[in-house]
Image (cartoon, rainbow, N blue to C red):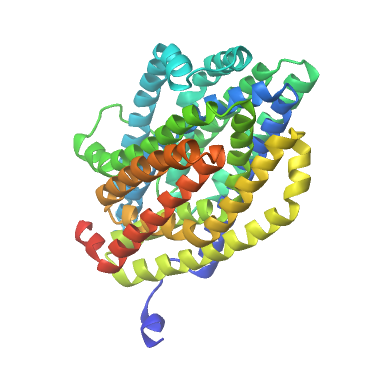
Amino acid sequence: MEISQKINYLFSNADLKKLIGPLIVEQLLLIIVGLVDSIMVASVGEAAVSAVSLVDTIMVLITQVFIALGTGGAVVAGQYLGQKNEKKSCEASDQLMLFLMVSSVGIMILGYILKNFILYKVFGTLENDVMNYATTYLLIVFLSIPGIAIYNGAAALFRAMGNSKVTMKISILMNSVNFVGNALLIYGLKWGVVGAAVPTVLSRYLAAIIAFYLIRNQSLQIHISEKMSFRFDRGMIKRILYIGIPNGLENSMFQLGKIVVLNLVASFGTAAIAANAVSNCLALFQIVPGMAIGQADLAVVSQCVGADDEYQTRYYTKKMLKLTYIGILITNIIIFITLNPILDIYNLSQETARITRDIIIYHGIMAIIFWPLSFMIANTLRASNDVKFCMIVCILSMWIFRIGFSYIIGKYMGLGVFGVWVAMTIDWVVRSGFFVWRYLSGRWKLHWY
């Protein structure tokens, strides 16, 4: 107690509330709009829901790449901020945005080149109506890739400053545009999956333009230079990519693993695909507090690392972990109570509803126990530059347990799509063990600059 009184904490409880509160709102908005979108698309039919879900898995994979790169830039900028070096923070921001702009255009072009491979090889054998919907949706939403990159880069920089209110407001606007657009085009003009895709593209570019404009405010601690350099600084890019690439590979391999598993899920039939799609959406609600607090943890710990303060790094890690457990517990209790009315909204077949119910109850219980240990501690390790360890553990655990056991439990043991979700939680348990060991060992401190 005497120690804590002598310490000048980098973040007060009020600061944490200002950071975490908007992040929770932003995450909820993203998921709610995704939920509403899926309900709207469900009015077109289960084939449309399945198609949109499949393509969105690819989009999540791409989004995770840019989130990881944004995180790399934000961690570096945050560490400089902890060192009271705002000039270097801004240089890191410039280089991050330049790299995102160039790489996003390249990935968009590559996506269109690989269109047929994605549709016919990655997704596997699909029913004709599902394939037609998936083709249409993919061709449109791939246009939004540069918008995704720019928005996530700017948003990460705002969070690195502890300013999540800005991104929350942008998210409200973006999702409002998406929601209204979907309602008009799906219900009003009867455009089907096109009506779901067009507003998505427009809203993402709107968010990107606003976020980029705001991050150029020269009065901010971290900002894009008024005369942004279009030359790459190899040293700064290398430092950003040191964090971003392992994190990106980890997230990309995670999503790629989900895509591989989707091929297995598709073999279980349309009911399994639809149940998996709805479950994916509802499962996000079950971990909303964790996802929000996880982003806050990266911002907070990166500044503690920059200040070379081990005590505060451990202090905030424990605090964030406790908040995550409390938040996920409360969220899942609410979802368990309201699950049946939620499933009724989807107007699912009896078999699909039963499968979804089983998955959500199981996922919620496991999330309460293992999700915080599996994901929160890893964020502290990443913010401490211990990214390679996280990457190796996550990739190996995913391929061995999440994917391998999906086939063992889902296909060979006959549990179907439910078995795929059991395999996912086995992956959580394994990751938790490694990350807790790494944190307690203190080896992550060896990677501090």
Q: Position of residue 106 (x, y in %)?
A: 36, 20
Question: Is residue 357 rendered to the left or right of residue 157?
Answer: right
Q: Is residue 438 visible in this depiction of the protein?
A: yes
Q: Which quarter of the picture shows residue 438?
A: bottom left
| Residue drawn at the location 78% of the way across and 40% of the way down | 344
Residue reaching furthest to the front: 413
Vertical placement of 145 versus 389: above or below? above
| Residue drawn at the location 51% of the way across and 43% of the way down | 419
Q: Position of residue 400 (x, y in %)?
A: 34, 43
If the image is split into quadrants, where does the C terminus sit?
A: bottom left
Q: Which quarter of the picture shows residue 95?
A: top left
| Residue drawn at the location 59% of the way across and 54% of the way down | 364
Q: Position of residue 325 (x, y in %)?
A: 53, 64
Q: Nearer the viewer, residue 138 or 2?
A: 138
Question: Is residue 253 rendered to the left or right of residue 57?
Answer: left
Q: Nearer the viewer, residue 59 or 218?
A: 59
Question: Is residue 63 rendered to the left or right of residue 272?
Answer: left
Q: Position of residue 234 (x, y in %)?
A: 20, 34
Vertical placement of 206 versus 335: above or below? above
Vertical placement of 425 versus 256: above or below? below
Q: Is residue 223 visible in this depiction of the protein?
A: no
Vertical placement of 354 versus 334: above or below? above
| Residue drawn at the location 55% of the way across and 14% of the way down | 135
